[in-house]
Image (cartoon, helix red, strand yellow):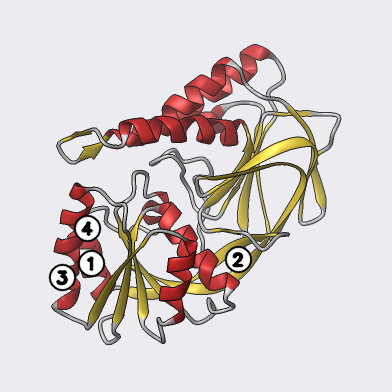
Amino acid sequence: MASDRSMLVITNSDAGTANQESLTAAVAVLQGQAEVEVVATSGPDELNDVLAGAGDRTIVVAGGDGSVHAVVQALHDRDDLAGRTIGLIPLGTGNDFARTLDIPLDACEAAELVVAGHTRPTDLVVDDDEHVTVNNVHVGAGAAAGRMGSQWKERLGSIGVGKVNLGRLGYPIGALQTALRPPSLRVLVEVDDAVVVDVDEQVLMVAVGNGASVGGGTELTPDAVPHDGQVDVLVATPVSRAARLGYLLRLPFARHEEHADVRIVRGRTVRIAGTAFECNSDGEIDGPVRARSWRVLPAAYSMVVPR
């Protein structure tokens, strides 16, 4: 359990009013059980300074996938990730890593889990430039959908219907836009040094899943779990325009596995090389690059989870 440790809560200083109300309520829950310090950061330098003074406290991320990514990246860069325990209060738009870990999406319920839950060793994906992926990284159509979806997420994120943040619609909208002009790559895809796809085959997208979903619940790699020392690698190779469109139209509704040109394999290392491609890692767009490799670091740190 995490209740016997003091806690450092890290939040985004640019969070909106609704998130601030949820954060205040969640912190009150934490303070009933532990000594708590809350710090808002607005960039990598501030975050690094805060983490430098974290000591052995449980770090509680109050934010979404991007916030978890930023904290884990900073700790990895500092060589201070091993042995760390991280709790999560999901205040983001998609909260996909929380969904994979069965962390409640309600802030107060998540705070109760932080003080009463169990720590579980959690895997991390790291590329050849030491950039981390906490949840999912994808290239091709998935990255394009993420890039377009982030624009819609920003536009819709300030709009809500009750407790529903319409920013969650960003990724499905981006996927549908991508379906109209889908990219096509010629890349070599290797998993554990075995060739899954060679450059003579057109590739629509590749996803490397440490977690199950992206975009607020779209289960891109539905069987992926971040505790087994492996990633699930989805490769989609529809050739014709109709086949590509059919795949991408299934994507927002998590029916893409039904497509005949989809395969999922599992492994510890992944390499993609060929025509230039962008990478979407936990919502962060990078590239274009012509080659990139990823490896799994098993049990790189611990998350507070229900079981």
Q: Which residue is found at the position 31% from the left and 52% from the top?
A: 14
Q: Quadrant of residue 196?
A: top right
Q: Is residue 62 visible?
A: yes
What's the distance in space between the residues labelled 3 and 4, CA to CA? 10 Å
What's the distance in space between the residues labelled 1 and 2, CA to CA? 27 Å
Q: Judging from the image, what secondary structure is the residue with disc 3 in?
A: helix
> Which residue is labeled 1 in the image?
111
Q: What's the mark number on residue 170?
A: none
> Which residue is labeled 4 in the image?
107
Among numbered discs 2 and 4, the one appearing first in the sequence = 4
Pair 2/4: label in front: 4
Q: Amino acid at mark 1?
A: Ala
Q: Is residue 1 left or right of residue 221?
A: left
Q: Quadrant of residue 153?
A: top left
Q: Is residue 254 visible?
A: no
Pair 2/3: label in front: 3
Among numbered discs 1 and 2, the one appearing first in the sequence = 1
As drawn, 131 above or below 47: above
> Which residue is labeled 2 in the image?
229
Q: Amino acid at mark 3?
A: Val
Q: What's the mark number on residue 29?
A: 3
Among numbered discs 1 and 3, the one appearing first in the sequence = 3
What's the distance in space between the residues labelled 2 and 4, CA to CA? 29 Å
Q: Which residue is found at the position 54% from the left and 79% from the top?
A: 80
As drawn, 183 above or below 275: above
